[in-house]
Image: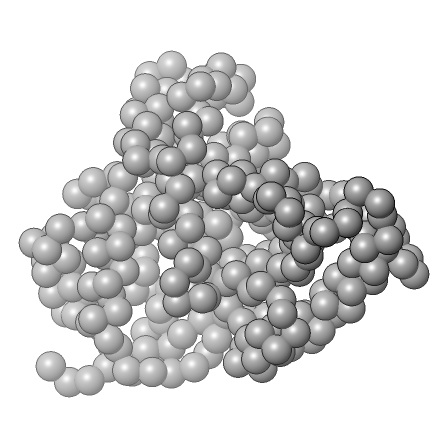
Amino acid sequence: MKEVVITKASGERVQFSPAKLKNSLKRAGADEAEIQVIVQKIKGQLFDGITTKEIYHMAFDLLKHKTAVTAAKYKLKHGIMELGPNGFVFERFMAEVLRAKGFDALVGQIVQGRCVSHEIDIIASKKHWHYMVECKFHNNPGFVCDVKIPLYIHSRFRDVTEAWEKQPDHIGQSYQGWVVTNTRFTTDAIQYGNCAGLHLLGWDYPAQGSLREQIDETGLYPLTCLTTLTAAEKQALMAAGLILAREIPLQQDKLSHIGISPQRIPHIVTESGALCANSLYQ
């Protein structure tokens, strides 16, 4: 097959990699037979300049016709981006992921620093550690967090830490600043974050324990991954306070409240339950 050049969300043009497509399908839970069929079908529809978004939609549609749960997992990255348009829901979502990992987490806290007060996305704690977590949400897959973001957050973290260290109940405590994004970091951002002692958590960073891996590990999939809900229904449910797919079987009344028919509700509940079947956080 002639090598095909595809266009990434960032505008970068690279050669199509069947291996990357196979890996993404495998992570979603597709078996080898399904993967081979999907990859061959997509190869037959490729053309120079095709976007990664177009390839994603091809794979998603093929998966959806086989198994909704696998399609929902494959949709994770796009499902996270549907938590927008602003970043508040993403902050709440990240707090749930942190709680599943054993942290205490509070969202949208005003914290007095040594110089000024700061509104912090998430204040988390675990044992003697205290974390100032800043979330950078983007619904454009081509956006990357450059070095200016960890630079700015590090200065805020130092101001807050200096105030915390003076509090009597913080004697013997340790502190760390976090930057969490649903997209990627530039090389300079990673270099600065590592040098400054910040914890960076991106879609695929670090190589072990990335945001994607932590969501898969905890089973805390956002309801925006579900294939049985429309975009408008997802927004309505989030406005009603739901974020996670696992919440839907427990709060079916909210499905009725936003106008979903009784005939559709069992299908939505079934998909939600199957998607979160291996959740570590019930």
The reply, left or right, for residue 279 in relation to residue 28 is: right
Quadrant the N terminus occupies: bottom left
The quadrant holding residue 93 is: top right
Question: What residue is rendered at 25% in x and 44% in y?
Answer: 70
The reply, left or right, for residue 182 in relation to residue 38 is: right
The answer to whether residue 123 is seen in the rendering is: yes
**In the rendered image, the vertical position of residue 250 relative to residue 186, given as above or below:** above
The quadrant holding residue 169 is: top right
- Where residue 74 sits: x, y (%)? 31, 51
- Residue furthest to the right in view is 115
Question: What residue is rendered at 26% in x and 39% in y?
Answer: 68
The answer to whether residue 160 is seen in the rendering is: no
- Residue furthest to the front in view is 172
- Where residue 23 sits: x, y (%)? 24, 63
- Where residue 267 sits: x, y (%)? 30, 24
The reply, left or right, for residue 279 in relation to residue 18 is: right
- Where residue 27 sits: x, y (%)? 26, 54
Question: What residue is rendered at 61% in x and 32% in y?
Answer: 239
